[in-house]
Amino acid sequence: MDSQQFRECGKAAIDLLADYVDNIRNRDVLPDVQPGYLLKSLPENAPENPEDWKNVFKDFTDTILPGVTSWQSPRFHAYYPTGTSFPSVIGSLLSDGLGVVGLTWMASPACTELEVVTMNWLGKMLGLPEEFLNCSSGPGGGIIQGSASEATLVGLLVAKNKTIRRLKETNPSLDEDVIKSKLMAYSSDQCNSSVEKAGVLGSMKMRLLKSDSNGRLRGETLKKAFEEDKAQGLIPCYVVANLGTTGTCAFDALDELGPLCQEEKAWLHVDAAYAGSAFICPEYRHLMNGVEYADSFDVNAHKWLLVNFDCSAMWVKNGYDLINAFDVQRIYLDDIKSEIKIPDYRHWQMPLGRRFRALKLWMVMKMYGAEGLRSHIRNHIALAQHFAKLVKKDKRFIIEPEPAMGLVCFRLEGGDNITKQLLDNLNEKKKVFMVAGKYRNRFVIRFVVCSRITTTEDIEFSWNIIKEETDLICTENIHMKPQTIPTIDHLETISLNEKSK
Ligand SMILES: Cc1ncc(COP(=O)(O)O)c(C=O)c1O
């Protein structure tokens, strides 16, 4: 492809994407394909000779696009949002077009410095304590990691290194391997799978402590765990507090956990992957009370801040902790010495290479402005509340727990089995997409407002589909013979329906 073809093809790609977004409501949210559909339809070997871009585009629209889930559809209510916006796509395109890798400052000065600037901007927008910012007088700063999973693992590895160094400082004869075998990590039983995985990858035993009846990890639970472990000669090292759990968007009691971690010298990492974005709105900042105790804080701009994956914004209070843990020098990585405080980001992350991810974050912050991003967050929360209102009006449903941010969890009064049946039926029909959660051991359906373009009409469209499927299920269950009804749950539903007749 020469530059002329690139111009033509690039313009066609932008047109295709603009059309895709404009017409996204006409597509089913889940694709109508079976496992292996693409494996069977594409050739087994790569083409020997170049193909014309128009043919390649045709392949894309005919075979690949039909197997794509419409994550940006207003009918997509699964997981949590994954951000995208036109400014972000342009930022990604420019980054790819420049094709730079920011190994060092010298390798591409703008790549490093724009990351410093955007992380300062975002940190201030979120109301993080000054110490986390590169523009403060201390050693803190922000970095864009690839994912919240990476940020949690980076935190764990740094905590491990720091604890070992601290213990060896007071007693140099201690065996490093023995210390490692005693280090303990903690989070709540509601933490994201990536938190537990960080323990596995970082070879640190992790206890997932019981959350309270609202899904929150409380101070007294952590205190008890510390005491039990210390009594066995174990060493508390790393705590992950969750602000906005994946299941039900619960907020751990950070202000209770913080002082305990400080006392124990355990590294406190905050996983605010989804809900953290809401802290750009001052009215939600009380949910991060205690953040001043944290050593690291992470929020996925690629979830709720309209920036495309991957853009996980992580701040640390002390960049030297990362450098001490990860600094490995080579002569070819020698950099310019600077009077100005500029982070050597390669020591703050796992890979050596780093993409120009700050460009898409910068584009989004410039083209939306802080106010534009705040109204996006507030709009999603208002839409979730509108959905909750619709559900509450229908006596067949129970909303539990109370909706938080853009998430509403609900279930049918009739019980777990019928709620699961409803979810399965809805996903099978592919018009809306939601996933399951658990709350107080009950099966719930998670409804998340995800798409940037969602309107009140979209929410009502999704609700009507849910309501119609519920009507169908309830009618079917009434017509089942009692011996074919496997659970009490179904019986409850029938009596409910009969009452409503
Ligand atoms: C609370 C929480 N933490 C971590 C993650 C993992 O994020 P990532 O895919 O960026 O690793 C998620 C993903 O949904 C999440 O909800």
Image (spheres, grey):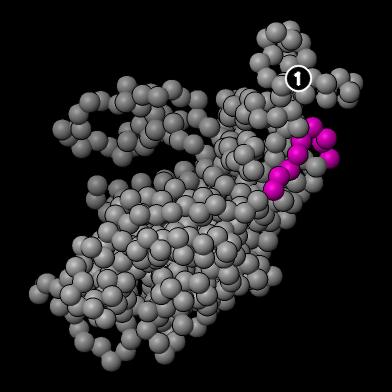
Residue located beneath label 1 in the image = 491
For label 1, being within 8 Å of ligand 1 is answered: no
Quadrant for the C terminus in the image: top right
| Between 258 and 400, the one nearer to me in the picture | 258
User: Mark 1, residues whose alpha carbon is within 10 Å: few (<14), some, or many (≥20)?
Assistant: some
Residue at image location 46% in from the left, 30% down from the top: 66
| Between 433 and 230, the one nearer to me in the picture | 230
Task: Indicate yes or no whether the magenta region holds residue 133.
Answer: no
Residue at image location 41% in from the left, 70% down from the top: 267
Residue 99 at least partly seen = no
Residue at image location 83% in from the left, 25% down from the top: 496
Q: Against 38, is 88 above or below? A: below
Q: Is residue 372 left or right of residue 12?
A: right
| Between 185 and 157, the one nearer to me in the picture | 185
| Between 470 and 167, the one nearer to me in the picture | 167
- Please, what secondary structure does the residue beneath circle 1 have? helix
Q: Amino acid at mark 1?
A: Leu
Horizontal and vertical percent for residue 426? Answer: 63, 28
Q: Is residue 79 left or right of residue 231?
A: right
Horizontal and vertical percent for residue 196? Answer: 41, 51
Residue 37 at least partly seen = yes
Q: Against 368, is 478 above or below? A: above
Horizontal and vertical percent for residue 378? Answer: 68, 61
Task: Indicate yes or no whether the magenta region holds residue 395.
Answer: yes
Highlighted range, magenta: 393-401
Horizontal and vertical percent for residue 475? Answer: 77, 17
Kindly give the residue lying farthest to the left in the view shown: 331
